[in-house]
Image (spheres, helix red, strand yellow):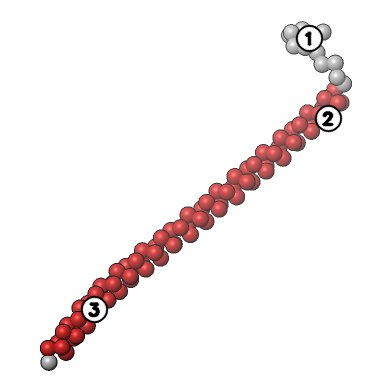
Amino acid sequence: MSSPQGAPVSTSPRRKLVKCFAKSRDTWKAKARASKGTSQQRKHRIRLLEASKGRWKEKATVLEAQLTGMQGQGRARAAEWEALRKSRWRR
């Protein structure tokens, strides 16, 4: 059987088709909501991790600058100590 436009006519009762289509739609919507929620959670987590990464990077830069300064002070003290040691041995 076909309709006047050439599309096949459904032999299933409309009440069963409506129930099936509604169930299919509801399943699809639930899946889409879950996917969207997961996507938003991941985007939020990425934002938080990027902010954290920036803070740690800034902290590391400050600590590296402090380390460089302390290494310079250590070299200066070592040179000073060496000079004192040499002057004591000369006496």
Instruction: Characterize the local packing of mark 2: few (<14), some (14-19) or many (20 or more) Cα atoms within 10 angstroms.
Output: few
Q: Nearer the viewer, residue 34 or 18?
A: 34
Q: Amino acid at mark 2?
A: Lys
Q: Is there a contact, CB below 8 Å, between mark 1 and mark 3?
A: no
Q: Amino acid at mark 3?
A: Ala
Left or right side of 56 for 80: left
User: In the rendered image, which residue does mark 1 sit on?
Assistant: 3
The answer to which quarter of the image holds residue 33 is top right
Residue 22 placement (x, y as % from top left) = 79, 32
Mark 1 against mark 3, which lies toward the viewer? 3
Instruction: Characterize the local packing of mark 1: few (<14), some (14-19) or many (20 or more) Cα atoms within 10 angstroms.
Output: few
Q: Residue at x 64, y 41 (%)?
A: 35
Gap in Å between the C-alphas at discs 1 and 2?
Answer: 23 Å
Q: Nearer the viewer, residue 6 or 76?
A: 76
User: In the rendered image, which residue does mark 3 sit on?
Assistant: 78
User: In the rendered image, which residue does mark 2 sit on?
Assistant: 19
> Which residue of the protein is positioned furthest toward the front in this rendering?
89
Q: Residue at x 34, y 66 (%)?
A: 64
